[in-house]
Each structure stands twice: as C-alpha cells, then as structure tokens.
Amino acid sequence: MPDGGADRRRRVRARRRGPLGSGAVSAVRTLVVDDEWMVRSMLRTILEAAGDITVVGEAGDGLAAVEQARALRPDVVLMDIRMPRCDGIAATERLGRLEHRPRVVVLTTFDLDEYVHAALRNGAVGFLLKDAPAADMAAAVRHAARGDAVLSPRVTRRLLSAFTAPDPGRRSEAERRLAVLTGKEREVLAAIGSGASNSEIAQRLHMSEATAKTHVSRILAKLDIANRVQAAVLAHQAGLLD
C-alpha cells in the first residue's frame, strides 16, 4: 500500500518555492565545510532533516571548499573558520570570485570580533556559533539563500558595539557616503539597520517584496558594500536609527 505520510511530505516539498525567489521548486543546495568529519556529519543530519535543504557536498578545508563550490554550484556554504591549508576567511574571499558565487555563512566556536570582521570583509553574509540550536542552523541557511543577513544575537551585539561606538569623524564619513541614496533608499537602509528582512521591509514601507529586494540591491551597489551586514553597520554609523 502507498505510504500516505511519504506522499504528504512530497506534496509539501513540491509546494516549496526556490530559495532565491525565482518561484522554481527546489531545495536550498548547501555545501558543508569543516575539518572535523563528525561536525560535517552532524551538520548534514541537521540540515537534511529540515526537508527543504539538500547538502550537495562536504569539504575538509578551504581549498577543497572552493573546488567543490566550483563543481557543485551550491546556493549556500556553511564555512568553518580554522582549517588546514586554507582557512574559512581566505576561502570565503576566493568563493566571491567564482562565476556562481554562493552565499557564505561562517560557523565557528569563537565569537571574537577579529574573526567576525574579517569574515564579513571577505564577503560572508552571516556568522553563527557552532553551539547554535539546530533550528537556527536551518533557518540561517534559508535566510542566507534569500539574501538576508545571518548573525547570532551575541555576535550582532558585539559587532554593532565595535563598529558604532560614538565617533564624530566616523559619523560624518558615513553621512557623506549616504548622500548618493534617495529618500526611500534611506528608509530601506534604516530598516536593514534594524535587522529587517526583505519581507519585513516590504510590510513596514508598504511595498512589494520584489521592490524591497530591488531597493536593497541598489543600496549595496551605490554604497559599494558586499552585504546587508555592512549596510546595517553603515546605517548605525550614520545615525539612521538614533
């Protein structure tokens, strides 16, 4: 007899939309990178249990990660920081040069600012600690695939505290950079600074999610920054959330 539960699960998966907003039916293709095989195995189990995430490959160091990403074209890479041959920070920078650039979420047991800063400068869209709950791991992959920023609350507090401490010179420079934005784009940037996703920006500013996504892309291009986390930092530095 047919398995009704399996049929229901297949129907649920068939209704899921593609992770990048294309409307296509697909799971989020994910590459797991860590030098410890037990950690890779744990992450694979957690992610594949989510149902809408497929682990397409694993790598044990940064060089292997770049090779795998070039061959497998994942949507998201979960990247360890401390690894032999090529660490996660250097690998993230190399992934940014690929024709198909995956979105990188850095995973580590360390929440030291130096690692956060370096990873974000090299193009990572998020930073999670390895002790994050399983549900947060899966959510991070989904958020990254949609283009949203991914930072654990503890890291977010430390990051914004480090980057947005009172500094008149820094504020003046941030305000100067924002001069290229329209009034609406400044509103969107302020929403990014508050941690809003594209859907939340759309609701808050009474626009479609597609329009919100377009505004975010234009803001990143105009300000010559790599990701939403850098945009959030700039919004705080310029005083948009004061």
Image: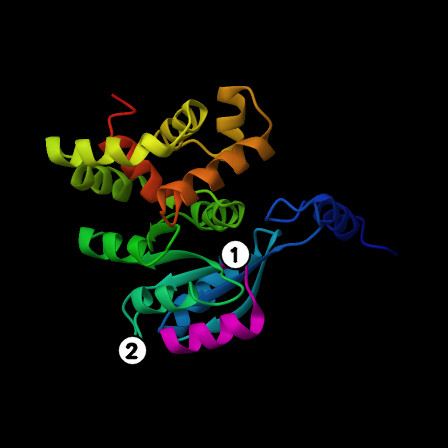
Q: Amino acid at mark 2?
A: Pro
The quarter holding residue 189 reads: top left
Does residue 61 appear in the picture of this structure? no
User: Label for residue 174?
Assistant: none
User: What is the distance, in whole Å, between disc 1 and disc 2 at their CAs?
Assistant: 24 Å
Q: Which region shows up in magenta?
A: 61-76
Q: Is residue 111 left or right of residue 202?
A: left
Residue marked by disc 1: 47
Residue 69 percent location from the top left of the image: 50, 70
User: Label for residue 84?
Assistant: 2
Q: Is residue 28 left or right of residue 43?
A: right
Residue 64 percent location from the top left of the image: 43, 78
The quarter holding residue 194 reads: top left
The residue that appears at 46% across and 42% down in the rendered structure is 148
Count of residue discs? 2
Magenta-colored stretch includes residue 20:
no
Q: Is residue 121 above or below residue 61?
A: above
Report helix, strand or loop for mark 1: helix
The residue that appears at 48% across and 67% down in the rendered structure is 98
Q: Earlier in the sequence, mark 1 or mark 2?
A: 1
Residue neighbourhood size for the residue with mark 2, other residues' Cα within 10 Å, grouped as few (<14), some (14–19), many (≥20): few
Residue neighbourhood size for the residue with mark 1, other residues' Cα within 10 Å, grouped as few (<14), some (14–19), many (≥20): many
Magenta-colored stretch includes residue 69:
yes
Report helix, strand or loop for mark 2: loop
Q: Is residue 65 above or below residue 89?
A: below
Q: Nearer the viewer, mark 1 or mark 2?
A: 2
